[in-house]
Image: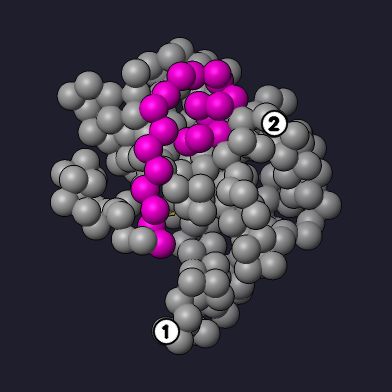
Amino acid sequence: MITLYHFPISQHSRRVVSLLEEAGIEYDAQFVDLMKGEHFSPDFLKINPNHQVPSLVDGELRLHESNAILRYICDKYELNNWYPKDLILRAQTEQWLDWIQCRMSPAVVNIVFNTMFAGDNADQKAIENGQQTMVELEAILEAELADKDYLIGNAPTIADLALASNVFHLGFAKQDLQGANVQAWYGKISQLEGFKKSLPEM
Ligand SMILES: N[C@@H](CCC(=O)N[C@@H](CS)C(=O)NCC(=O)O)C(=O)O
């Protein structure tokens, strides 16, 4: 059985939990409490020297990076609906996964970390930069979701789960995206049982 090291407050963890729960895959869930510094324990550093969740262990394999973990799970369990095999749909899924990692996640981290978790070290400039970027990114998403239900066509993929984990995270800083198309899309993802199960108890 695969083991997932995760923490519910972690946006990157939630996207993986969403997929595992949605696909009904049995897994050993290991809670790593970031608030208590458990990610710096010598045992966890052997699993992921980056001291980050999520991390996956499957036999000899130790895997970090949430999107790599999503891809691995889809390939291992042949979840072709979540990670399409069609050349064009696959390329679009990869595009959005990379966009989410390279553009969306850093802006979300700037906003949420500095608003919620940085305390006296909060960087106001980083919050402003994040908010400025988010205006541009939301406009891109609004246009993309104007004529379709999900990022890639008419069914959710791992790109939607990855994006939804970021969008939920913005809620910690009360920065919910307001665009009608993004809201409609997020309403659909929010109904997924796997997504619901990934959320922290509030
Ligand atoms: N690129 C990584 C980012 C993972 C990440 O930033 N995890 C955060 C929680 S969301 C974490 O573990 N932070 C603790 C640390 O960096 O020390 C991924 O996609 O998995």
Q: Quadrant of the C terminus?
A: bottom right
SS label for mark 1? helix
Give the residue pinned by disc 1: 121
Identify whether 191 is placed above or below 178.
above
Identify the residue at horizontal 47%, vertical 36% (top origin): 16
Tell which of 32 and 154 is nearer to you: 32
Identify the residue at horizontal 63%, vertical 68% (top origin): 173
Residue at the outermost front position: 36
Identify the residue at horizontal 62%, vertical 63% (top origin): 172
Give the residue pinned by disc 2: 192
Ligand 1, what quadrant?
Answer: bottom left
Residue at the outermost top position: 78
Residue 142: x and y in percent read 74, 51
Q: Is residue 13 magenta?
A: no
Count neighbours of disc 1 (C-alpha within 10 A) and say few if under 14, some if 14 to 19, many if 20 or more. few
Q: CA distance from mark 1 to mark 2?
A: 36 Å
Q: Quadrant of the N terminus?
A: top left
Identify whether 166 is placed above or below 73.
below
Question: Is residue 12 shown left or right of residue 165?
Answer: left
Question: Is residue 183 shown left or right of residue 14?
Answer: right
Q: Amino acid at mark 1?
A: Asn
Q: Amino acid at mark 2?
A: Leu
Magenta residue span: 16-35
Identify whether 60 is placed above or below 32.
above
Residue 30: x and y in percent read 37, 38
